[in-house]
């Protein structure tokens, strides 16, 4: 129900509206963002909301993803077993011979040798021996070297090669993918030793002794050509 206007008086009659005055309450001012040329008010860590959110998202004030080191790759396979090491060595020998211009192939398992190569109008039989890494021979005052047995084979080297079983021994260093060739007639001991590439003989001490033998063959000298020259016709 509406009330009549008669008899009602406005209590502030006679006062000018401006006489009430106006009090402006401004929010406290914040310093600007600490980033150069940014005038936005500071929000956290000295930055405005834009730069603070960018820091949380990207790890930095630049508008890009943070540089994160890639995770270390997982190993593709377990360490090589004897069978895998032998197979890898055979394929490395065949690849080395093919890339050197020879015709070569891996033989079947029933053959007493692993690879045949056609050279000088005949088939040369090659026995492959693989070493995963050099052996440290410091106990015997010798330098680290790759070592292969030339007389025995099989598990625990209990079987001996028969007479005239092969013509050339291919010595494979799997860790550096190197191959050296030795003809049967060039073998003078029970083992073939090849020095690690780049190894240098240690200096002579005050007593005139040298720790680590300076003797030994090198892969650069054990080429297929020199081995074929040593094969009996």
Image (cartoon, rainbow, N blue to C red):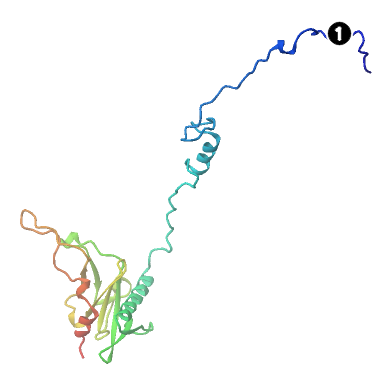
Residue underneath mark 1: 9
Residue 8 seen anywhere in this rendered image of the structure: yes
Q: Along the horizontal axis of the image, is 2 left or right of 55? A: right
In the image, 184 versus 202, the foreground residue is 202
Above or below residue 179? Residue 68 is above
Above or below residue 177? Residue 120 is below
**Residue found at x 79% / y 7%:** 14
In the image, 149 versus 28, the foreground residue is 28
Q: Along the horizontal axis of the image, is 168 left or right of 19? A: left
**Residue found at x 42% / y 54%:** 72
Residue reaching furthest to the left: 207
Mark 1 residue crowding within 10 angstroms, few (<14) / some (14–19) / many (20+)? few
Residue reaching furthest to the bottom: 121
How far across and down, in percent of the image, does residue 225 sit? 22, 82
**Residue found at x 21% / y 76%:** 222
* Quadrant position of residue 108: bottom left
Above or below residue 197? Residue 47 is above
**Residue found at x 27% / y 77%:** 170
Residue 230 seen anywhere in this rendered image of the structure: no
How far across and down, in percent of the image, does residue 139 sit? 18, 59
How far across and down, in percent of the image, does residue 203 sit? 11, 57
* Quadrant position of residue 145: bottom left
């Amino acid at each position: 129900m509406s009330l009549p206007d008669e008899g009602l008086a406005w209590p502030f009659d006679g006062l000018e509206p401006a006489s009430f005055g106006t009090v402006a309450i401004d929010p406290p001012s914040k310093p600007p963002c600490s980033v150069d040329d940014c005038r936005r008010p500071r929000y956290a860590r000295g930055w405005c909301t834009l730069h603070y959110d960018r820091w949380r998202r990207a790890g930095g004030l630049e508008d890009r993803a943070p540089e994160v080191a890639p995770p270390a790759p997982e190993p593709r396979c377990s360490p090589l077993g004897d069978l895998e090491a032998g197979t890898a060595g055979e394929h490395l020998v065949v690849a080395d011979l093919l890339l050197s211009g020879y015709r070569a192939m891996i033989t079947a398992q029933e053959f007493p040798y692993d690879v045949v190569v056609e050279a000088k109008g005949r088939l040369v039989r090659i026995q492959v021996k693989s070493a995963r890494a050099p052996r440290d021979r410091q106990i015997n005052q010798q330098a680290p070297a790759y070592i292969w047995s030339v007389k025995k084979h099989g598990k625990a080297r209990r079987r001996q090669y028969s007479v005239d079983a092969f013509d050339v021994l291919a010595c494979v260093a799997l860790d550096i993918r190197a191959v050296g060739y030795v003809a049967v007639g060039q073998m003078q001991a029970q083992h073939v030793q090849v020095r690690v590439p780049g190894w240098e003989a240690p200096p002579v001490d005050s007593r005139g002794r040298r720790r680590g033998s300076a003797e030994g063959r090198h892969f650069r000298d054990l080429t297929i050509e020199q081995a074929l020259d040593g094969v009996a016709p």
